[in-house]
Amino acid sequence: MKLKTSGYSCTSEVTLELISGKWKIPVLSLLASHTRRYNEMQKLIPEITPKVLTIQLRELEASGLIHRKVYAVVPPKVEYMLTELGLQLMPALLQLCDFGTHYLTHIQNQDQQFVQPSKS
Amino acid sequence: MKLKTSGYSCTSEVTLELISGKWKIPVLSLLASHTRRYNEMQKLIPEITPKVLTIQLRELEASGLIHRKVYAVVPPKVEYMLTELGLQLMPALLQLCDFGTHYLTHIQNQDQQFVQPSKS
DNA sequence: CTGTATCCTTTTAGATACTG
DNA sequence: CAGTATCTAAAAGGATACAG
């Protein structure tokens, strides 16, 4: 996932590209509060396979949003954490949450219009 | 692209799903300022093929972000515009732009560190 | 003018087994 | 523990031609 350097109609596409990937948001959410180890994330997101987890982590690392800290010990120990840049992404992510929440309630209320109130 | 009703770890994933698609942001950007006709958008985004443009428009319509207004005339006339909900998405989109811009300058400055200043 | 239909390529993710 | 390797499936997008 190398970021294009041109051809964007809007810089929001850059951000979108950074967080596009089925497990990027779950991973970033985990790292928002804690430093996490590989194994730990696998357990917290049981549906993700090791291959895909590795890919998502490597892409986030390559884009500079997270840092991979390797300890030279046996057995291996690797910690992942947000970078300063990754931390700066959080407000935008929160706003996406806000709209997502708004959207879900909006959709729900739309449905309600077609539900007949019970005439008790 | 039917929206899942559960299984999100965060509601930002809902929003992300709504705007994921190679041409969704360009389309939304066009509609942010004007009502647009199909043909008009094809000309403004020349790289998009009619099939894909139709798919993206239909998905945005299905998710309630845009409205498709059909005039019963010959030759056909169809106008696309943001819904109220689509309009409410704009602040989040702007914040994605902000971070995207910030990200690009950040990356650029990182590169600069490896450029040796010329010793004239 | 506003699309559809068909075929093909690319991208992304999942299943499963294995390794330093 | 922290990954790789291989194979397969599904989703997304592009090229091109055609239709009401």
Image (tube, coloured by chain):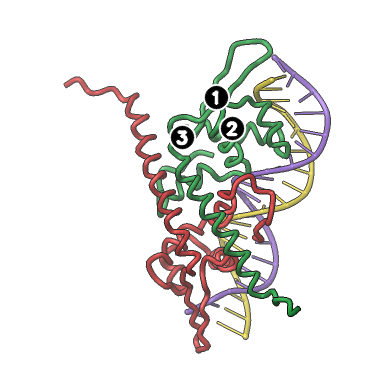
Chain colours: A red, B green, C yellow, D purple
Tags 2 and 1 both on a single chain: yes
Name the secondary structure under disc 2: helix
Q: Is residue A51 visible?
A: no
Name the chain letter of the residue that bears numbered label 3: B
- C19 w.r.t. B64: above or below: below
Query: Position of A79 compared to C12: left or right?
Result: left
Chain letter of the residue beneath label 1 in the structure image: B
Residue at numbered disc 3: B87
| Image spot of residue B77 (x, y percent) | 63, 17
Most foreground residue, A86 or A74: A86
| Residue placed under numbered mark 2 in the picture | B57
The span from disc 2 to disc 1 (Cα, nearest Å) is 9 Å
At label 2, counting other C-alpha atoms closer than 10 Å, the crowd grade (few under 14, some 14-19, many 20 or more) is many
Image point (67%, 10%), residue name: B74
| Residue type highlighted by circle 3 | Leu
Q: Earlier in the sequence, mark 3 or mark 2?
A: 2
| Residue A3 position within the rendered picture, expressed as x and y whole percent measured from the top left | 65, 58
Label 3 element class? helix
Q: Position of residue B66 (x, y in %)?
A: 51, 30
* CA distance separating discs 3 and 2: 16 Å
Residue at the spot x=42%, y=56% of the render? A91
Mark nearest the camera among 3 and 2 is 3
- The quadrant the C terminus of chain A occupies is top left
Number of the front mark, 3 or 1: 3
